[in-house]
Amino acid sequence: MTKSRLLAIVQLSTLGLLRGVLVVWTAVTLVFVAVRVLPGDAISAELLPAGASAAQIEAEKQRQGLNDPLPQQYLGFITDMLHGDLGQSLRYRDAVIHIIQDRIGPTFALGMAAFAVMLLAGGGLGVANIETSPILLRHISRVLIAFSQSVPIYITAIVGVFIFSLELDILPSVGSDTPRHLILPALVLGFHTSGAVARVLSASLTDALQQPFMLTARAKGLPPIDLLDHALRVALLPVLRVVALQTGFLLGGTVIIEGLFVRRGLGSLLFQSVLDRDYPMVQALALLAAIVYLLANGLARLGQRLIDPRLTTHFAEFG
């Protein structure tokens, strides 16, 4: 490895780290402000139905630090976060990190299964949508791509439940206890993230197949499968970035999917925490989502540079 390329890698890593810190700080700050601007709070929502007096509610708010000035609360939140303390849930009266550890399993399984569906469906539809594919296959792929990008995810989920759970009775519609409970929500979420991947892959493949090196490959008499392999090596670069961006949709989609399929995960926990104004829980989940999104984008950039080292070399020359 040359000195210039090593320097470029160090510069890229430093810039990526600084960018990541800025993104995480911005995300948690916006969430910190947003949850406090909304009316109501978790303490009042919990104690009022139990018949607590206004004085008792104010005393509990004071004990929890919710009556402190907003800058003081923010400084305490950032300080605790830097020390690895995400606080205590106002609703569950337990450490936020413990609740997240208890709920992260079903959400992680759903995310990984949906991610696999996204790659398989997006890759298949993208390849089927290029001009060299049979016309019937191309039309079917275009309809499915348009459907995945235009129809709301909850409509697909309801249709899926009606067909596979009510009519055919082959898949459960609620719960997260067994692997069978994972199939339907993963298919719905993965399908809705596959449309963008398929569209970008199709456009990138179409462009790659028209490049001069592909004309040379055809002149050599390479079979179609080898031609596709050569084109995919070039077409994957923009697709990796789209895959990383779709990770954000996966994270947001879990909130809807876990609510529709009554799954006990982080998505349903976030939804309930927002309703309950459980500030520490919402802040911790926003922090976790920002970190996952940054990791996905970092892996995508790393994959692009592994596929095409010229990206790192170009940065070294530019710097």
Image (cartoon, rainbow, N blue to C red):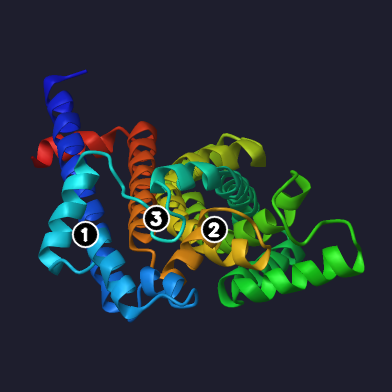
The CA distance from mark 3 to mark 2 is: 46 Å
- Do we see residue 130 in this rendering? no
Residue 133 left/right relative to 168: left
- The first of marks 2 and 1 along the sequence is 1
Q: Residue at x 21, y 39 (%)?
A: 83
The CA distance from mark 1 to mark 3 is: 22 Å
Front-lying residue, 184 or 50: 50
In this view, the mark in front (1 or 3): 3
Q: Which residue is mark 2?
A: 202
Q: Residue furthest right?
A: 168
Circle 2 — which element?
A: helix
Q: Residue furthest top?
A: 1
Whether tag 1 and tag 3 are in contact, CB under 8 A, the answer is no
Residue 13 location, x and y as percent?
20, 35
Is 133 located above or below residue 139 in the figure? above
Q: Which residue is mark 3?
A: 89
**Label 3 is placed on what type of residue?**
Ser
Mark 2 crowdedness (10 Å alpha carbons): few <14, some 14-19, many ≥20: many
- Do we see residue 77 in this rendering? yes
Mark 1 crowdedness (10 Å alpha carbons): few <14, some 14-19, many ≥20: some
Residue 250 location, x and y as percent?
51, 57
In this view, the mark in front (2 or 1): 1
Is 229 located above or below residue 114 in the figure? above
Give the number of marks: 3
Q: Quadrant of residue 189?
A: bottom right
Circle 1 — which element?
A: helix
